[in-house]
Image: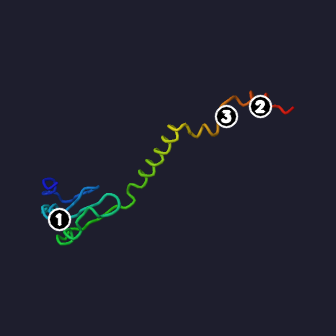
């Protein structure tokens, strides 16, 4: 990462570790931005010492996380044979068994 930040004005980080040596090697760095929540992978003391602000974007990927969770649940139900239409659609033609089960 050292080679990539030497001439950078900004760093956008996901889960990358931005340590003190990376911050000090970036002579032109003006800001470090963290995608998502938390700054635990960024050396905040080193950034503060160099006068570089650290910002994060909480909630920026919350919709994608929710959509992925929904997709995983749908696939799980489908693989287990519990697709929603199995609960609403009878497994047989509706008239055939009802006619056969008339009370005596």
Label 1 element class = helix
Give the residue at the far front of this rendering. 104
Sooner in the amino-acid sequence: mark 3 or mark 2:
3
Residue bearing the label numbered 1: 20
Sooner in the amino-acid sequence: mark 1 or mark 2:
1
Q: Indicate the position of residue 104 as horizontal and vertical percent values.
A: 87, 31
Label 3 element class = loop
Give the quadrant of residue 38.
Answer: bottom left
**Neighbour tally class for label 1: few under 14, some 14-19, many 20 plus, Cα within 10 Å:** some
Give the quadrant of residue 103.
Answer: top right
Distance from label 3 to label 1 (Cα)? 64 Å
Q: Indicate the position of residue 92 as horizontal and vertical percent values.
A: 68, 29
Image height of 88 relative to 95, above or below: below
Distance from label 1 to label 2 (Cα)? 75 Å
Residue bearing the label numbered 3: 90
Q: Quadrant of the N terminus?
A: bottom left
- Which residue corresponds to the image point at 31% horizontal and 57% vertical from the top-left? 35
Residue bearing the label numbered 2: 98
Q: Indicate the position of residue 10 as horizontal and vertical percent values.
A: 21, 59
**Neighbour tally class for label 2: few under 14, some 14-19, many 20 plus, Cα within 10 Å:** few
Judging depth in this view, the residue of 104 and 52 nearest the camera is 104
Judging depth in this view, the residue of 35 and 20 nearest the camera is 20
Q: Residue 11 has which mark?
A: none
Distance from label 3 to label 2 (Cα)? 12 Å
- Which residue corresponds to the image point at 58% horizontal and 40% vertical from the top-left? 84
- Which residue corresponds to the image point at 65% horizontal and 35% vertical from the top-left? 89
Q: Is residue 37 left or right of residue 8?
A: right
Image height of 3 relative to 100, above or below: below
């Amino acid at each position: 990462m050292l080679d990539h930040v030497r001439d950078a004005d900004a760093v956008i980080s996901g889960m990358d570790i931005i340590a003190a040596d990376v911050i000090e090697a970036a002579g032109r760095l003006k800001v470090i931005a963290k995608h998502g929540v938390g700054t635990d992978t960024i050396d905040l003391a080193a950034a503060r010492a160099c006068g570089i602000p650290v910002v994060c974007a909480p909630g920026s990927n919350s919709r994608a996380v929710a959509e992925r969770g929904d997709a995983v649940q749908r696939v799980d139900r489908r693989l287990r044979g519990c697709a929603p239409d199995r609960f609403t659609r009878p497994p047989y033609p509706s008239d055939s068994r009802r006619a056969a089960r008339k009370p005596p």
